[in-house]
C-alpha cells in the first residue's frame, strides 16, 4: 500500500467550531485495546469511528443475505438481518435523541449487535452451538460471536462502550427496567466473555454498562416483534388474525410507537431505561405468542431439523478435518483463513489467527456465511444441491 497518500484534516478554525457544536458526551472513557490508534477528531469522534469500522466490514455486508426469522421463501419482502439492525438503530436513535443520549454510540451498538449471527437465524445458532460444544466444550451464542468477530477475529480496536453494548444486547430476556452498571475495563469485560463461552446461562446475568446499551437491548425486541408477524403473513404461514387481539400492541407501527412513547415517558428523569407495568406485560405477552406461533412452528422446526442440521454437521466436520490436516488448498483456508489474514496484516497480526482453537475457527467460518453461500458450499463439498426453498408452503 502507498503510505504517502493524503488524508486531509479540518482547519483549526473549523475543528474548534465543530467541537463547539457537537453535544458533549459525558461519562464515557473511550477505552480501546490500542489507545495509540484511532484517535478521535472533531469530525470523527470515537463512536463515529466505531460505526464506520462496522459498516465497512465485509461481514456487515453479508447480513443482507442472512435469515432474520424465516428462510427459504421466494419473497423479497421477508426481512433479512441487515434490515433488522437498521431498524434497531433507527428506533433506538429516535428514543435516544429524546432522552439526550449519544446517538453515535447507539448506532454503533445497533449496527454491530448481530455481526456474529449464523445463517438460518436462531435455528442455525442452536445447531452450531451443539456442534461447537460437542467438539470443544465451548458454547456458541451470537452476541458473544459478534464481539469475537469485531474484537478478536478482525481486531477493529472498537471502544469498550460499543463492545459492551453488543455483548449485553441479548433481547431474548425482557425486563421492565435496565440500569447501566458502568464501564469496568477490558479485564472485567474479557472475563465476562470467557464465562459466556463456557456457560451460556451466564448471558442472562449480563447488564449493559451504558444507558445507550440498555436502550438498544430494549429496541432490539421492539424492532422484531411486529416485523416478525408481518413476515409470518408474507411468507404464507398464517394471518394477522392468528394472533390474539391487543388494544395496546397489535400491529408493527403501533408496537413501535407505543413502546417508544412509554420508554421516553418513564425514562426522561430516571437512572435507566424503564417501561411501565402495563406496557411491559403486553411486550412479554406478544413475545410469548410470537415464539409459540412463529418461531416454534412445526413446519419451520421440522425443516431445520431434517435438512439444515445434517448439512451443517457435515460442513463442520469436513472443515475441522481440513483444518487439523493443515490442508491449505481446502475451502476453509482459501475462503476464510486467507481472507481473515489479509485483513489482519493491517492490524499487524497476519497468521496469528491460526493460533485460535481449530473448533472456534470452524465456528467463525460457518457463522460468517450467508444463507446462499452455505447452500452453495454444501453443494460444492458434497455434490448435493439443495433447492433452497420450502416446497408446498
Image: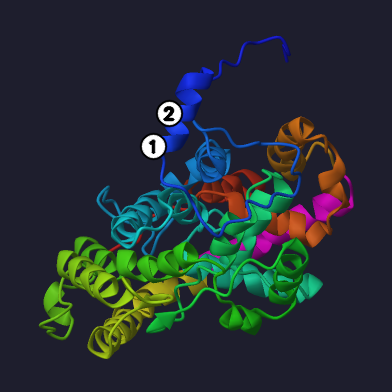
Q: Where is residue 59 in the image (x, y as percent from the top left)?
A: 56, 44
Q: Please say if 204 is above or below 366.
A: below
Callout 1 secondary element: helix
Q: Do the residues labelled 2 and 1 touch (CB within 8 Å)?
A: yes
Residue drawn at x 72%, y 48% as measured from the top left: 153
Residue appearing at x 43%, y 28% in the figure: 17
Secondary structure state at the residue bearing disc 2: helix
Residue where numbered disc 2 is placed: 17
Check the image and report above or below for 206 versus 128: below
Q: How many marks?
A: 2
Dominant SS in magenta? helix
Give the quarter of the figure containing the N terminus: top right
Residue 164 coordinates in the image, percent (x, y): 60, 63
Q: Residue 124 carries which label?
A: none
On residue 21, which mark appears? 1
- The reply to whether residue 331 is in sight is yes
Q: Where is residue 270 in the image (x, y as percent from the top left)?
A: 37, 77
Q: How far apart are marks 2 and 1 (CA)?
A: 6 Å
Residue 75 shown in magenta: no
Q: Which of 311 and 21 is in front in this view?
A: 21
The magenta-colored residue range is 308-326
Q: Position of residue 25 (x, y in %)?
A: 49, 52
Q: In which quarter of the image is residue 310?
A: bottom right
Q: Name the one closer to the observer, 302 or 14.
A: 14
Q: Does residue 327 appear to the left or right of 25 in the view shown? A: right
Splitting the image into 4 quarters, where does residue 267 fall?
bottom left
Write the residue at 51% across / 33% down: 42
Query: 264 or 57, which is in the foreground?
Result: 264
Q: Residue at x 64, y 50 (%)?
A: 150
Amino acid at each position: 500500500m502507498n503510505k504517502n497518500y493524503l488524508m486531509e484534516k479540518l482547519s483549526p478554525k473549523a475543528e474548534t467550531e465543530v467541537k463547539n457544536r457537537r453535544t458533549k458526551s459525558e461519562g464515557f472513557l473511550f477505552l480501546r485495546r490500542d489507545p495509540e490508534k484511532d484517535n478521535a477528531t472533531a469530525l470523527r469522534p470515537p463512536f463515529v469511528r466505531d460505526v464506520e469500522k462496522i459498516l465497512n466490514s465485509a461481514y456487515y455486508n453479508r447480513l443482507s443475505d442472512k435469515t432474520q426469522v424465516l428462510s427459504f421463501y421466494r419473497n423479497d419482502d421477508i426481512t433479512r438481518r441487515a434490515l433488522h439492525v437498521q431498524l434497531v438503530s433507527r428506533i433506538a436513535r429516535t428514543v435516544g435523541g429524546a432522552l439526550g443520549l449519544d446517538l453515535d454510540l447507539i448506532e454503533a451498538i445497533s449496527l454491530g449487535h448481530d455481526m456474529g449471527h449464523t445463517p438460518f437465524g436462531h435455528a442455525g445458532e442452536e445447531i452450531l452451538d451443539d456442534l461447537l460444544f460437542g467438539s470443544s466444550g465451548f458454547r456458541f451464542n451470537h452476541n458473544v460471536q459478534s464481539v469475537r468477530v469485531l474484537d478478536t477475529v478482525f481486531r477493529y480496536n472498537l471502544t469498550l462502550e460499543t463492545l459492551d453494548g453488543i455483548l449485553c444486547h441479548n433481547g431474548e430476556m425482557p425486563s421492565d427496567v435496565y440500569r447501566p452498571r458502568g464501564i469496568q475495563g477490558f479485564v472485567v469485560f474479557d472475563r465476562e466473555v470467557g464465562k459466556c463461552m463456557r456457560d451460556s446461562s451466564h448471558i442472562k446475568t449480563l447488564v449493559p454498562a451504558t444507558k445507550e446499551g440498555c436502550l438498544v437491548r430494549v429496541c432490539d425486541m421492539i424492532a422484531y416483534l411486529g416485523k416478525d408477524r408481518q413476515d409470518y403473513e408474507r411468507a404464507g404461514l398464517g394471518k394477522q388474525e392468528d394472533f390474539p387481539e391487543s388494544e395496546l400492541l397489535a400491529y408493527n407501527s403501533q408496537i413501535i410507537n407505543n413502546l417508544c412513547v412509554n420508554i421516553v415517558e418513564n425514562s426522561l428523569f430516571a437512572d435507566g431505561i424503564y417501561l411501565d407495568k402495563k406496557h411491559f406485560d403486553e411486550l412479554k405477552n406478544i413475545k410469548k405468542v410470537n415464539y409459540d406461533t412463529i418461531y416454534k412452528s412445526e413446519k419451520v422446526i421440522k425443516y431445520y431439523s431434517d435438512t439444515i442440521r445434517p448439512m451443517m454437521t457435515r460442513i463442520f466436520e469436513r472443515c475441522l478435518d481440513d483444518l487439523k490436516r493443515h490442508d491449505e488448498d481446502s475451502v476453509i483456508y482459501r475462503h476464510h483463513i486467507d481472507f481473515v489474514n489479509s485483513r489482519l496484516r493491517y492490524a499487524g497480526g497476519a497468521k496469528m489467527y491460526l493460533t485460535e482453537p481449530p473448533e472456534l475457527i470452524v465456528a467463525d467460518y460457518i457463522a460468517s456465511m450467508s444463507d446462499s453461500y452455505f447452500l452453495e458450499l454444501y453443494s460444492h463439498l458434497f455434490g448435493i444441491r439443495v433447492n433452497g426453498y420450502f416446497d408446498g408452503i
